[in-house]
Image (cartoon, rainbow, N blue to C red):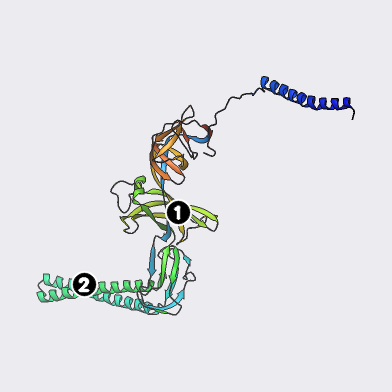
Amino acid sequence: MSEPRKHRSLLFKILLPLVVLSLGIAVYQYQVNNPPQIQKKALEPHYPTVEVVIAQPQDTEVEVYSQGTVRPRSETVLKPEVSGKVVWISPQLVNGGLFAAGEKLLEIDDTDYRTALASSKTGLVRAEVEFDHARRELKRIESLIRRNLASETQVDQARRSFRLAEASLNEARIQQEQAKINLERTIIKAPFAGRVRKESVDFGQYLTQGENIATLYATDFYEVHLPIGIEQFVYLDIPPGTQGVLAPDNTLPVTIAGNIGENEYFWSGELQRTEGEIDAATRLVYGVVTVENIVEPGHAPLLVGMFVKAAIQGKVYPEVITLPRSALRDNQQVLVVDEDNRLHFRHVKILRVQGEEILVQSGLKAGEAVCISPLTVAVEGMRVNTSPAAGV
């Protein structure tokens, strides 16, 4: 290689790094002198959003809830009052059979009782004849003694015969009446409208007086025995000291609910009495509700043995605020949101907690917003955003 070319090559190798280094320094200086401008944005505070309900005081009627089983109000064991062979049985005299009041259920052979009635009629006629003769004889003797034609002994004897005849006549009348009653008793009728719980009689069976024929219960009214806690009685409008049967003006309306299949039905009843003693095992008092069994088209009747729920109408409390149960915090407190959307703890007096609601008797004012949302952290004075509670 010639000398000039070597000189140019060496010069290029020396100058090229210097040029690149100079350009790098220039770019660096430009970036230092002209830094990028960062646009600053104002920070927006983020507050949790809570649901609130507005306190609305109003007169509130409380209810006491219980449950029990439907029982018959009237139940009796059917027994014959005379003895004899069964000659007829009603088709309804079977387990579960329905009957009307006064309906004929069973008939006993009345042959002997018809004979006894006929005999009593004969005895009555004989007694009437003897009585009439004794009465006329007494009058005759009394007439003779007034004329001194009869002795005192004859008068005494006539009076004695008259009294015996009178007693025999009364006895004959009683025997005839008893014979009529016994004949009527050969036909056994239903004492009330109801249903047969259990029967134990067959056609041709000889029944003795007082033998059990069937167990019947009335279907016009039923009873439900409801267990009620002692602490719940304060909510019922029952005069202090009342025990047993309530006065007609003090009975309490009760709504009875029961399911038949997938359908729920409702009946109206009355709390008419309490059993007046505390169950030692459960510490409960039993209230007795009477329910009229009205059978209407499209409405299922009550059935004995059905399990039902009951809501007893209680007292009416003035100026009570109803809130969702989620509004209640520890130590009977709620969170109130003020006009500046700040949280404040507030102690309130709880009248009652029922289901998913709480009844606040005091501690809140009308129109105040109450937080019902769960908060992991709640601090006095904390800012929040509010939203009306859905469905409340």
Q: How many marks?
A: 2
Q: Is residue 237 visible?
A: no
Q: Which residue is mark 2?
A: 135
How packed mark 2 is, by other alpha carbons closer than 10 Å (few <14, some 14-19, many 20 or more), is some
Q: Which residue is mark 1?
A: 309
Image quadrant containing the N terminus: top right
Three-letter code for the amino acid on which mark 2 is drawn: Arg
Up/down of 236 relative to 202, above or below: above
Three-letter code for the amino acid on which mark 1 is drawn: Lys
Q: Is residue 250 visible?
A: yes
What's the residue at 13%, 76% (across, down)? 154
What's the residue at 49%, 35% (across, down)? 53
Question: Residue 344 placed where, x, y %?
Answer: 43, 32
Residue 44 quadrant: top right
Residue 120 quadrant: bottom left
Up/down of 274 relative to 97, above or below: above
Residue 126 horizontal side relative to residue 351, left or right: left
